[in-house]
Image (tube, coloured by chain):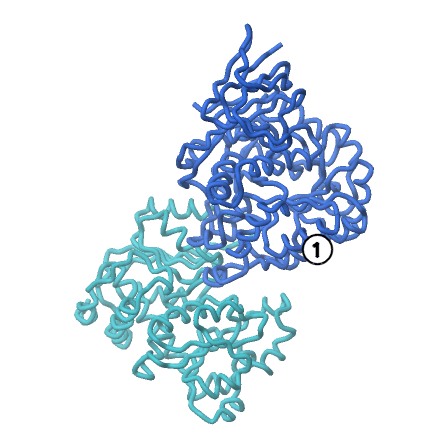
């Protein structure tokens, strides 16, 4: 039996309300013991964590691994290694691959590739509709059997309210979340950035906030109608957060996630036609950014998810309107979140860990987010002291499309443990 | 005094002094076009490429005249844009130009920011001949020269741009340039074609063209593009003409002199009636003449020419 002792660190477990200096002993891929001054017996590897913070493995519930179809941008292996380097022990993989992950075989493929790679775990998210065409429901049951944990047509919004209603209703069989990329495509039109003064100055087509808010409201109302679980992907506007809060207060089962780029950057980041500031939904206004931070602080927004969207260098090296949407985020998510939210005074570290580990695990219905005896041995060791500069050329991801290149941040993962095995360590 | 920038990408970043320098430099160059032999050797030996990703006859021809009258060697490259064949990427086009050691590139592209993109990747001077909805700096400059010629100044002038402001690079360049020079700028058009945030730039939004004609010293009438009607920004050209068209009747009702500019080409009977287009208040053809002079000035200054010697350069005979 493989044994690993993580010694001398500050153990933070938000679910079990632990925050103190404790040693953690992992055995046989499970948490065996938590205590002070644990002894490493024979055959026990030791990971020194003095001065570091030890937390339940971080989970990123919105990641595009690009395999199958765009292995030039990322693969399951490279994406899971990038995840591990960012401190993530598990990721939820989005289904807008090529071919689309809308059947049990495709789901099984992803799980197998992740096991082969041996880095972060992959929890596949299946497509809601066949081929993400927005018309007929895909086989949710078959996909769940094969290991899917939720469903989304992400990349696209479920255009028809009727189809969304059916999807939510059908999902009641499995009790899983239906994740929506909330936007009215007709209002988005040819828009490439937030509608506002910056877009007017740059001569770029704008996307009004209402394009998201209308669908967030629609989906919440459908969640109320059906009693099913809705999860709002990458929420980006002040009023979207208001809507989610009101429906939560009514007891409707809606959860939401926000990305680090949305709570750190505004539409001014597009100045100079920076294609690494282009994503969907777009970067918004300062008022929206503030509302996202408040939402994360008070729990209206349940978790942080990166929406890691790799793009080949060639595709982003072009005029703004022609570049594809998306930025990567696995390797910058924790450092940016820690710097902006904890050092920025928006929340304490315990809450941040809850938002990045316990909450996403809970929404996906997977084990994790806690380090009690018997829990899976998925652990992240964090350095929250060191200030460093993000260098996209040092990323493990195959892609380089980040808006955070050269940004000074504090905090990073220094070791990632999955199933009791160290899958990545900072050199 | 010298023009210190390497590129002309837009008027937003220029200072009033720089704009004044270009306009003043254009004056002696105007005279060259009046001569029998329309040529001076100022840019002899320089290679200039007119890289047009969007079709254009008048702007390209205007630049070509400007370049040839300064004795530069010019090449026109028209890149047909097809959705099926994406063709050579913008980056590769840039690199190929670099490899051929082009001195200056005049670029027109349908994507806002394309000239800026190019300028960050090649060593040549880059001149924006119109990028998407963003800017058309030489048009803004020639409009200002035309206004200055007529009124003797730009400061305090009330200039209103009428038409599709949302999609107009001509409107944006005019707004930046005129505001820098102290003019009062307004816009007028169907609300679907006027971005509300434009007022944050210190521009007054007029809802009725009649109000514009009773206040403005000059109007710049923009061409209404057929695609806008097809995307239902307004119901029909006839309705546009009825609500916003510049007609003799409207001018008479205003009862005052308003100078009329138009970047061309005109849709007679849509944004401007034929009798107005051919009438006494328009200076449309003067704009065209000024266009060549302004472009000569821009090329001269970017090539390192000193404004003080522009008059001397203009008087040099081949």
Q: How many marks?
A: 1
Residue B270: % across, % down: 56, 79
Residue B126: % across, % down: 34, 56
Residue B142 in view in this figure: yes
Q: Which chain is cyan?
A: B
Q: Is residue A119 above or below residue B134?
A: above
Left or right of B5? Residue A154 is right
| Residue beneath the point at 40% across and 35% down | A387
Residue A390: % across, % down: 42, 37
Residue A93 in view in this figure: no
Task: Identify which residue, A116 or A9, lies in the foreground.
Answer: A9
Q: Quadrant of residue A187?
A: bottom right
The local secondary structure at tag 1 comes to helix
Left or right of A284? Residue B217 is left
The colour chain A appears in is: blue
Quarter of the image with the N terminus of chain A in it: top right
Check disc 1: other Cα within 10 Å, few if <14, some if 14-19, many if 20+.
some
| Residue beneath the point at 38% across and 64% down | B12
Q: Which residue is mark 1?
A: A217
Quarter of the image with the C terminus of chain A in it: top left
Q: Quadrant of residue B237?
A: bottom right
Task: Identify which residue, B38 or A416, lies in the foreground.
Answer: A416
Q: Is residue B44 above or below residue A78?
A: below
Left or right of A20? Residue A175 is right
Task: Identify which residue, B39 or A409, lies in the foreground.
Answer: A409
């Amino acid at each position: 039996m493989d044994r690993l002792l993580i010694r001398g660190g500050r153990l933070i477990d938000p679910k079990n309300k632990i925050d103190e200096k404790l040693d953690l002993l992992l055995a046989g891929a499970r948490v065996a013991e938590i205590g002070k001054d644990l002894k490493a017996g024979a055959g026990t590897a030791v990971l020194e964590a003095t001065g570091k913070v030890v937390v339940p493995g971080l989970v990123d519930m919105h990641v595009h691994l690009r395999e199958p179809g765009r292995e030039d941008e990322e693969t399951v292996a490279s994406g899971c290694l990038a995840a591990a380097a960012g401190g993530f022990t598990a990721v939820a993989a989005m289904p807008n691959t090529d071919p689309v992950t809308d059947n049990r075989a495709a789901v099984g493929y992803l799980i197998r590739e992740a096991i082969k790679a041996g880095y972060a775990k992959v929890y596949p998210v299946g497509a809601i509709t066949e081929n993400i065409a927005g018309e007929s429901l895909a086989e949710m049951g078959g996909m769940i059997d094969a290991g899917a944990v939720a469903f989304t047509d992400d990349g696209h919004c479920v255009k028809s309210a009727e189809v969304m209603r059916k999807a939510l209703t059908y999902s009641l069989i499995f009790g899983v979340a239906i994740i929506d990329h909330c936007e009215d495509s007709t209002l988005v039109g040819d828009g490439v950035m937030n509608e506002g003064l910056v877009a007017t100055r740059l001569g770029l087509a704008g996307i009004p906030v209402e394009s998201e808010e209308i669908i967030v409201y629609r989906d919440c109302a459908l969640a109320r109608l059906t009693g099913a679980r809705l999860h709002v992907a990458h929420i980006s506007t002040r009023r979207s957060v208001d809507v989610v809060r009101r429906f939560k207060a009514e007891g409707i089962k809606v959860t939401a996630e926000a990305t680090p780029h949305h709570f750190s950057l505004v539409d001014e980041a597009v100045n100079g036609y920076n294609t690494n500031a282009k994503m969907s939904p777009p970067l918004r206004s300062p008022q929206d950014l503030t509302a996202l931070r408040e939402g994360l602080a008070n729990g209206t927004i349940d978790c942080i998810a990166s929406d890691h969207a790799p793009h080949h260098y060639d595709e982003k090296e072009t005029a703004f309107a022609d570049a594809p949407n998306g930025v990567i985020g696995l390797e910058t998510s924790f450092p940016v979140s820690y710097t902006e939210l904890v050092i920025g005074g928006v929340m304490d570290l315990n809450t941040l860990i809850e938002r990045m580990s316990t909450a996403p695990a809970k929404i996906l219905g997977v084990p994790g987010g806690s380090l009690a005896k018997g829990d899976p041995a998925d652990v992240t060791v964090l350095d929250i002291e060191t200030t460093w500069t993000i260098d996209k050329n040092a990323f493990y991801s195959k892609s380089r499309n980040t808006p955070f290149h050269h940004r000074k941040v504090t905090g990073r993962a220094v070791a990632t443990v999955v199933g009791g095995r160290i899958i990545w360590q900072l050199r | 005094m010298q023009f210190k920038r390497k590129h002309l990408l837009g008027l937003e970043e220029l200072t009033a002094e720089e704009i004044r320098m270009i306009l003043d430099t254009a004056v002696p160059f105007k005279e060259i076009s009046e001569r029998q032999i329309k040529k001076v050797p100022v840019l002899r030996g320089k290679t200039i490429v007119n890289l047009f990703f969007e079709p254009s006859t008048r702007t390209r021809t205007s630049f070509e005249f400007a370049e040839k009258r300064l004795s530069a060697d010019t090449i026109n490259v028209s890149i047909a844009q097809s959705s099926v064949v994406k063709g050579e990427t913008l980056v590769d086009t840039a690199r190929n130009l670099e490899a051929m050691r082009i001195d200056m590139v005049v670029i027109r592209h349908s994507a806002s920011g394309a000239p800026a993109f190019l300028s960050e990747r090649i060593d040549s001077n880059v001149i924006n001949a119109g990028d998407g909805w963003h800017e058309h700096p030489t048009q803004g400059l020639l409009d200002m020269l035309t206004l200055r010629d007529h009124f003797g100044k730009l400061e305090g002038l009330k200039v209103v741009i009428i038409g599709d402001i949302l999609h107009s690079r001509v409107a944006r360049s005019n707004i930046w340039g005129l505001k820098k020079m102290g003019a009062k700028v307004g816009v007028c058009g169907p609300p679907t074609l006027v971005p509300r945030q434009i007022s944050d730039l210190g521009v007054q939004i007029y809802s009725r063209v009649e109000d514009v004609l009773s206040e403005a010293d000059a109007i710049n009438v923009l061409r209404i593009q057929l695609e806008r009607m097809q995307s239902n920004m307004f119901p029909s050209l006839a309705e546009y003409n009825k609500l916003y068209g510049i007609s003799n009747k409207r001018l008479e009702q205003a009862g005052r002199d308003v100078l009329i500019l138009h970047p061309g080409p005109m849709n007679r009977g849509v944004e401007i009636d034929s009798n107005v287009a051919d009438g006494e208040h328009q200076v449309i053809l003067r704009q065209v003449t000024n266009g060549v002079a302004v472009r000569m000035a821009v090329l001269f200054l970017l090539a390192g020419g000193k404004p003080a010697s522009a008059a001397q350069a203009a008087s040099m005979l081949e």
